[in-house]
Amino acid sequence: MSIRKIRLSGFSLVELLIAMALGLILVTGMIAVFSGNKRTSELTSEMANMQESARFVLETISNDIRSAGFQGCLGLDHGSMDDLTNEQVIGNRGMYLTAATGSIIMGPGNWQPQPVGGFVLPGSIVAVTGTHTISLQGGTENRVDLEEPMHDGTRPNPAIPLVLEKLAPFSANVGSPVIIADCENSNLFTITDMQLVNDSWVISHEASENTTGAFTQPFGNNNKLRQVSVTPYFNHIYFIGDAGVLTEKGDRITSLYQQSYPFDPVVNPPTELIQGIENMRVSFGIQDRNGQVQYVQANEPAYDPSAVVSVQIGLLMSSWDQIASVDDENTYVLAGQQIPASALSVDGNTHPLDARFRLAFNTTVKVRNRRVQKQ
């Protein structure tokens, strides 16, 4: 009986090393592909979030710009507004000079020029030096006509309550400032009482909350009833401030804030609209007597708030984390102004030299209620 020998064979050491090397190459390639896909996914997701946030902010500010100076059929440049409120938020020339204004943040508590209407920045929010602000005021779109003229049955009377159009929704409240206007005059006053009578809002404007309990004229008389409108007043200031939070790497997060009238930092503090807005720049379109428009900043000699016909808004959005593959050395243009990178960035005149992802957004909006006449 013969014994059959079986010869066994295996991988040599060289073959094993080659196989391991090939495996490592494949695994490294897979990790690189996965890492690249992850970074691409993060960038795509962050870009979508930034675009959505910017779209919301620009639409919000744009709506206010379009409504700036609105006071019914009275043009912003063709009539004056009398401020009857105790706070005197408009000034003695009405909204002619204050419908759309701006400031440059020069430092803590130092805004040039100063905002109108007694604005006080809360001490808990640090506004970003070098960034711009914009202040917009006027009547809202919630316009309601008068149901009957201001007549007490004997004579026109500017002191009697207003009777608004029947079944008309009205969004103002007691204590709110409201504009009443026809095509020649307008008054800003504070509502002291509201009563729903026979499906009409009856609005009182007594001297307890106003400089006088009577308007400058009895509105709606002399066949001008349908020219009279009553609309809630808005005054919004937008600025960039420290959000009070840091990322894991210690990066500061800033936000866009909206301060609404009344400007009480305790009772009515600013509202944080969107985090991740690093900078805002504003340029005002100033129209001269020949109809030419030039865009200037609020601290430039050519800036004239009575001739603002359009506004350019530029926003610089940044990601929360440093998700880019390299440091951002780009120079961004916001409202015609360059924002370069800087390793020593401490204000809004530059942006940090880091790996956060950034996008710039710009828009130009016309002040529809401003009609500067050519001469």
Image (cartoon, grey):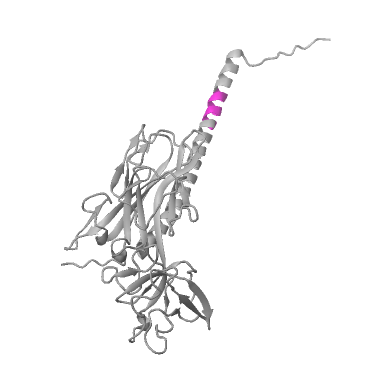
In the current view of this chain or complex, which residue is farthest to the bottom?
154
| In the image, residue 2 above or below residue 178 | above
| In the image, residue 306 above or below residue 105 | below
**x, y percent for residue 3:** 80, 10
**x, y percent for residue 246:** 49, 38
Foreground pick, 342 / 186: 186
Question: Residue 332 sits in which quadrant?
Answer: top left
**x, y percent for residue 258:** 43, 54
- The residue lying at 38 percent from left, 79 percent from top is 158
| In the image, residue 10 above or below residue 57 | above
Query: Which residues make up the magenta segment?
Result: 22-30
**Visible residue check, residue 263:** yes
- The residue lying at 47 percent from left, 67 percent from top is 175
**x, y percent for residue 163:** 45, 80
In the current view of this chain or complex, which residue is farthest to the right?
1
Apparent side of residue 4 relative to residue 299 in the rendered image (left or right)? right
